[in-house]
Image (cartoon, rainbow, N blue to C red):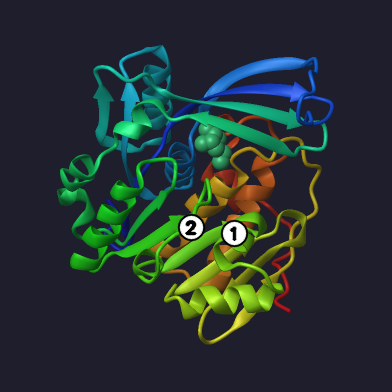
Amino acid sequence: MDETKGRIVIAGSVNIDISLAVSRLPGPGETLLADAISVSGGGKSGNQAVACGRLGGDIALVARVGDDDYGRLLMANMAEAGVNTDYLTVDPVAPTGQAYIGVAASGENNIIVVQGANGQLLPETVKAALPLIQGASYVSTQLEIPLATVHTLSELCAAHKVRFVLNPSPVAALPDELLSSVSILVLNEHELAVLAGPGDEAAQLARLLGRGVGQVVLTKGGDGVVLADKNRTAHYDAFKVDVVDTTGAGDTFTGALLVALSENRDMAEAIAFAQRAAAIQVTRRGAQDAVPWRAEVDSVTWPVNEQR
Ligand code: RIB
């Protein structure tokens, strides 16, 4: 093991994604015919973990699957990516989480998640993973698991001085007590609007920082990334690529960001690395299936983004 590389712990949801390729996303009450259906590994934390593994991170996943073929497929994906699965447990009753995803020809998607075994990732389940969390550099989660478990993770991180990273998706109102424990909040514009309320982007970012978040990383798809902390607001342009499917792009971005930070790269470098990984991801179909390997990201010859 590379002793200079910090350990990353991802705790949260793993799903099987049932993706339907459609010409456009349906409106309320509308029936559409799909052009194709595919089944692959997903879940926001599962995707982040695969990204960390394929990109060379020291990564462990704390999650829960059902005792079914979907759960076994997800375990195989983790093994292929080199993810430590000592705390990927099997629920004897609840099925593996599932996500039903419409993917439009534009690459946009909408997602409905059936929580399944992710709903059984309870506070005591993550407390049992304390040996992993102690001494980790980063613990990352999202909101597809019980909120009580998210609170427990934040408390464990505070008690053991581990940086706590949150992707607030699916977005929900969060108390200041939780937000103030977040070192890095990675979110999109929709999530920013819900968490920070009305106003322009600068006011919204300032409001989140005012509530105690350490750094905000706002992902804006084709409009790039904004980093805000108490010292600066910086914008990083997006790479121009042909978008096929945006599923899991934010998760790959977060996983890649964590890998670069765990290698002690600075935030601007980490964002550039994460943008490269996510840009490759969106040119392919699926979530975990589309995550690039380290050699692919390192061989990208696109120019480094200019900071505005
Ligand atoms: O972020 C994309 C993921 O959201 C999908 O893989 C799906 O499983 C849902 O968790």
Viewer-closest of 191 and 235: 191
Viewer-closest of 108 and 282: 108
Q: Are marks 1 and 2 in contact (CB under 8 Å)?
A: yes
Q: Is residue 241 left or right of residue 99?
A: right
Q: Is residue 139 left or right of residue 278?
A: left
- In percent of width and height, residue 69 lies at 40, 12
- In percent of width and height, residue 108 lies at 74, 39
Q: Residue furthest top?
A: 69
Q: Earlier in the sequence, mark 1 or mark 2?
A: 2
Q: Amino acid at mark 1?
A: Val
Q: Amino acid at mark 2?
A: Ala
User: Considering the numbered disc 2 on the image, is that residue within a helix, a strand or a loop?
Assistant: loop
Q: Quadrant of the C terminus?
A: bottom right
Residue located at (79% from left, 31% from top): 27
Q: Badge 2: how crowded within 10 Å, few (<14), some, or many (20+)?
A: few
Question: As displayed, is residue 231 above or below residue 58?
Answer: below
Residue 67 visible in the snapshot? yes
Residue located at (67% from left, 69% from top): 198
Residue located at (44% from left, 37% from top): 46
Say which mark, if any, is on residue 194. 1
- In percent of width and height, residue 47 lies at 49, 39
User: Considering the numbered disc 1 on the image, is that residue within a helix, a strand or a loop?
Assistant: helix
- In percent of width and height, residue 190 lies at 65, 55
Which residue in the protein does label 2 denote? 173
Residue located at (61% from left, 67% from top): 197
Viewer-closest of 239 and 91: 91
Residue 292 visible in the snapshot? no
